[in-house]
Image (tube, helix red, strand yellow):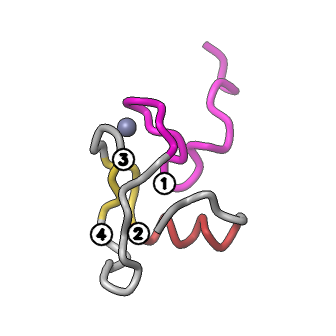
Amino acid sequence: MGLLDHPTATQGGLKIVCEVCGGLSIKPIDPAEASDGAEVYCRRCNAVRGTIADLRALARQSTGDFEF
Ligand SMILES: [Zn+2]
């Protein structure tokens, strides 16, 4: 186990890849209703993947593969 085993995916709060099931999808969120502190859940296994604030920060940085 080296220190480089975990690349930038763990940076910030949002887990791009689910640690539990390895899935990429998250549950649909209504951005108008969700507050920044609300949690984002894995679409497959319901694990917490981060918060709305994390998701928004990520969306600003990338082209975004997330479904809202
Ligand atoms: Zn999952």
> Label 2's element?
helix
Tags 2 and 3 in contact by the CB under 8 Å rule?
no
The question of residue 48 being in magenta is answered with no
> Label 1's element?
loop
Q: Quadrant of residue 45?
A: top left
Position of residue 24 in the picture relative to residue 44 (left or right): right
Q: Which residue is located at x 50 percent, y 63 percent?
A: 67
Tags 1 and 3 in contact by the CB under 8 Å rule?
no
- Percent across and percent down for residue 39 are 31, 62
Residue underneath mark 1: 14
Residue underneath mark 2: 52
Q: What are the residue bounds of the magenta stretch? A: 1-24
Sequence-wise first label, 2 or 3? 3
Q: Which residue is located at x 43 percent, y 33 percent?
A: 19
Between circles 1 and 3, the one closer to the viewer is 3
- Percent across and percent down for residue 1 are 61, 13
The Cα atoms of the two marked residues, 1 and 3, are separated by 11 Å
Residue underneath mark 4: 38
**For disc 4, does the CB lie below 8 Å from ligand 1?**
no
For badge 4, the amino acid type reads Ala
Position of residue 62 in the picture relative to residue 36 (left or right): right
The Cα atoms of the two marked residues, 4 and 3, are separated by 13 Å
Residue underneath mark 3: 42
Q: Quadrant of residue 40?
A: bottom left
The Cα atoms of the two marked residues, 2 and 3, are separated by 13 Å
**For disc 3, does the CB lie below 8 Å from ligand 1?**
yes
Tags 2 and 4 in contact by the CB under 8 Å rule?
yes
